[in-house]
Image (cartoon, helix red, strand yellow):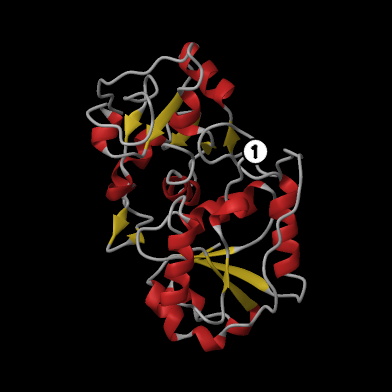
Amino acid sequence: MILNKETLHTFDLKRFIVLDCRNVMDNKEKTLELIKEQPLETAVHIPESPFMFTENGINNGRHPLPYKEQVTSLHLALTSGGHELLLVSDAGSFYHTRLYYLFNLYGLKSYLYNGDFQDIKDTKESFARFNGSPKEVEGHTAEFKSDIFRSMSDVAAAVDNKENVLLIDVRTRERYLGITEPIDFKKGHIPGAVNIPNTDIYTDGILNLHALDHMLGQIKEYDEVFVYCGSGMSATPLFTLLYENGVNVKLYAGSFSEWITDASNTVETKENTL
């Protein structure tokens, strides 16, 4: 369930353990600096690795999904006192939506706070406290409770067979068109993909769940919608938006960084439209 400032305060806040999902991508040192300099005292900080991605995870690409054991053990530990989980992050973030996706994938309940991070800071003393810190565990089980994951082979089949599937790339227009590529060793996008950059779905740093109302009718004409980014992290806000609006949406978890690891997969730089 997604909550904003108004709907959050219809609940007893003591029921929630707040999960501070703020991270600096691939930079543990800067993440620790951020949390130290701008603490959210009553919250539990969730590091991006191994809880949002793990080096040897389910898929390839830069940020593989963690296995069932890691995500379920995190959820079990945090809810052991009978509390529920409220996922928060800072403006324009995709970390809380990534963890929200993972909990959903493995059939675990959580609440996503879609509002100003400052509102949570202002009411931090009203929430429950968790005494402890998340633990890393080993696991190798890719057993999903929700049908919201798609693999590279699924995407390749959709591309090759020209299925009634819509591919959406959320990266910047420059990366989508292959004008620039600051991270990956190939430029462009998966054949047939359209571009809806994340900047189109945020208003003042908050995910606007109505940002695509004008095109939802077209999007829903497809049997399935696969969303992707560079590594499966920043596509989760668009996944969340579409999922909340009743679209049959899936996350291509490996995303472009996995797609280009297979030499038989082609890329293109032309623009596609709905």
Q: Quadrant of residue 93?
A: bottom left
Residue 38 seen anywhere in this rendered image of the structure: no
Q: Position of residue 85 (x, y in %)?
A: 62, 69
Q: Residue at x 30, y 31 (%)?
A: 176
- Residue 263 in percent (x, y) is at 48, 13
In the shown orientation, is residue 126 left or right of residue 195? right
- Residue labelled with disc 1: 56
User: In the displayed structure, would residue 22 be above or below residue 254?
Assistant: below
Relative to 122, say whether 195 is above or below. Answer: above
Answer left or right for 271 relative to 266.
left
x 75%, y 58%: residue: 73
| Residue, far bottom | 125
Q: Residues within 10 Å of mark 1 (few under 14, many from 20)?
A: some
Q: In which quadrant is the N terminus drawn?
A: bottom right
Q: Residue at x 44, y 52 (%)?
A: 25
Q: Amino acid at mark 1?
A: Asn
Left or right, residue 83 beside residue 40: right
Residue extending farthest to the front is: 29
Examine the rendering and report whether any part of residue 125 can be seen. Answer: yes
Between 10 and 168, the residue placed more toward the observer is 168
Q: Position of residue 26 (x, y in %)?
A: 47, 50
